[in-house]
Image (cartoon, rainbow, N blue to C red):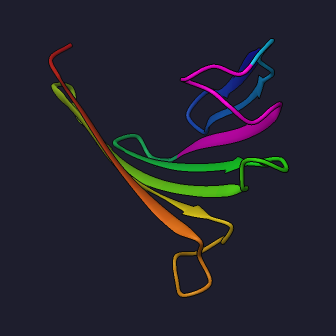
Amino acid sequence: LGGMYTLPRIGSFSADLLAPLQDSDRYRGGTRLSLGAEFNPLPWLPVYLGWNLGNKDYPWRFSYGLGLETGLLEFGLGVQCIESVIPGYSSKGLALGVFFTLGA
């Protein structure tokens, strides 16, 4: 279950509730809530923030990202910190993500 609210020229806010009926090979760990935001300080520069609250089986995570959007190209780079707000020695793990889209 999820939802998103968009504020024109400012950005968007989203929430997702993941509550599977049973564990599977793809998903284990019970109900989780994720919150996200995309801010647009400049029309071509999106900034992404995310927080997954986690549960007893899945540690909480905090994510940051930065993008570049032109008429032809979308590119984004993000980092996710596990059990830490900023990457560093206290983080229990780190995940990196990249995406790009070419064309309209």
Classify residue 85 by image quadrant. bottom right
Classify residue 5 by image quadrant. top right
* Viewer-nearest residue: 46 or 49: 49
Question: Relative to residue 42, is residue 25 drawn left or right?
Answer: right
**In the image, residue 90 lies at what x, y percent?**
62, 84
Question: Relative to residue 87, is residue 96 drawn left or right?
Answer: left
Please, is residue 44 above or below residue 82 in the view? above
* Viewer-nearest residue: 32 or 58: 58
Q: Which residues are magenta?
A: 23-39
Q: Residue at x 66, y 40 (%)?
A: 36
Q: Residue at x 66, y 56 (%)?
A: 61
Is residue 32 on the magenta stretch?
yes
Disc count in the image?
Answer: 0
Is residue 76 on the magenta stretch?
no
* Viewer-nearest residue: 97 or 89: 89
**In the image, residue 25 lies at what x, y percent?**
55, 23
Q: Residue at x 68, y 67 (%)?
A: 83
Please, is residue 11 above or below residue 52 in the view? above
Locate the N terminus by quadrant: top right
**In the image, residue 4 lies at what x, y percent?**
70, 22
**In the image, residue 74 lies at what x, y percent?**
26, 33
Classify residue 20 by image quadrant. top right
Locate the C terminus by quadrant: top left
